[in-house]
Image (cartoon, grey):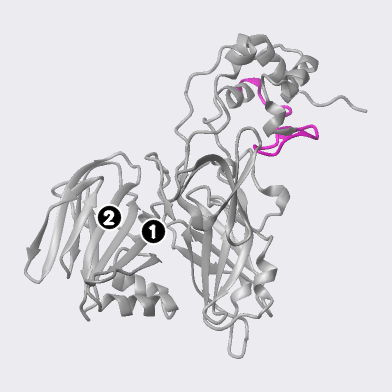
Amino acid sequence: MRFAVPGHRSRRLRSLPMCIIAGAALSIGAGDPTPKVIAVRPTNPLEVRIDFDRPFDPGLPARMVGRFIAFGDSVVPGSEPSSSALSDPKDPTRGAIRIAAAIPLDDDRALRLVTDPHPIDTRYSLRIPTEPKSVDLVYDLSGVEVVWEEEVPDEATSRRFVWPSLDPRAAMERLGAIPETAEYAACATKPGRLTLSTMARLPKGRLTVLLRSNRPFEAVLFNEPVEVAAEGKRWSGRATIESSGEPIDLTLRIQTGTTEPIEVETLAATSPNSSETKVESSRLILPWAPSPPPPASASRPVAALYEGGDPTSGAKVFRSDAAKCATCHVYRGEGGKVGPALDELVGRERSWVYRQVAEPSATIQPRYVPYTVVTKDGRVAQGIVHAIGADRISVVDTEAKSTEFRREEIEELRPSSTSIMPVGLTGAIGEQAMRDLVAYLVTPPAAK
């Protein structure tokens, strides 16, 4: 399955490890039988892998199914929402994703969690109810996607990894004693090629990026090939770019087939005379991480477009075939559940509500980031994606129609920064109906 991303990327610059394990839940001393987490990382938009230092109890996978992973810039270890807190309309970076399946791996020393899509580049908080103590941790979407391909005359095999660093040697040290490090060590001694893909969060402005390795390599930065030359026993590539502050595509290809550990160094300088500084691994984001929608227009709609209006007439607009609001949204206990519930709009400023309806892509709650799904036989579907068990997903479109796909038949899963809610509602229903609809959405229901 291939995971693609649109060009627009997150603006946040964070300094976070790939995984933070904290809290009293990890006060593991001598004789404590609680499994300790060695590594946790999202291996694709729909999965998280957790490696432990010892086997967990057999009941753990069943206890994980149906739980939620909280996300948001401010989440901490132990943040665990209920299903009623899957999104926060007042903070579009906060929400939760559901765990649909948990599969034990490597003799119960690893756990693969199948989840709804990770919808935003931020922090994720997960509680693991191990016995006898729970473990709380936080991870993010920083990292590097790695593919190793063997070069043999008659056949080609490949392996996929997710690493916390572009430097293979540093990545192996950080991941520690898990099956992935042993598997990579076996691959690295065979003739083949490593392809490392990431997005680099670099400062805004004109930058010089320097790449060094103890092995020959190819590199592509910002969709442009980097010229690489030998310098003694090392190889280096240098590129000067104009950074907008958005994460930039970076891909390295390195030949394997030696017992010497491969090393990669990534540096950046802000001017010809400034010193080169290391690009920390926390500034590398997985290439499939979704991006936020583009900034909303700074212009405000004129007051005549949203002031006034009749809530009673607005209720009819909400249910009408022309507006189709009730097809996707729940309000006052009626409607569909494709998009977010609208009860939190009561009492909000009318100009703000008008903008949410008229410009649906201006603010997309992370839980409702739409995806385009392309199958291996050429079928295409677009909508909100949910995981169903370990091997299927559903895609719910604007008509509230759900289509299921087996994961094995999916060729590409691509997030979009454009809402599936159609634009141009004012033109479709008329200005007066729009004013009535806004009045209905912001007016508290009459007391019974």
- Which residue type does callout 2 highlight? Thr
- Which residue type does callout 1 highlight? Ser
- State which region is magenta: 331-351
Magenta-drawn stretch contains 337 = yes
Q: Quadrant of residue 87?
A: top right
Q: Residue 361 at x, y = what percent?
A: 52, 31
The main secondary structure of the magenta stretch is loop
Does residue 345 appear anywhere in the picture? no
Camera-nearest residue between 90 and 182: 182
Residue beneath the point at 41% across and 73% down: 175
In the image, residue 101 above or below residue 317: below
Is residue 84 rendered to the left or right of residue 1? right
Is residue 97 rendered to the left or right of residue 239? right
In the image, residue 58 above or below residue 150: below
Neighbourhood count class around disc 1 (C-alpha, 10 Å): few under 14, some 14–19, many 20 upward: many
Judged from this view, the residue extending furthest toward the right is: 448
Does residue 395 appear anywhere in the picture? yes
Neighbourhood count class around disc 2 (C-alpha, 10 Å): few under 14, some 14–19, many 20 upward: many
> Which residue in the structure is indicated by mark 1?
282
> Which residue in the structure is indicated by mark 2?
251
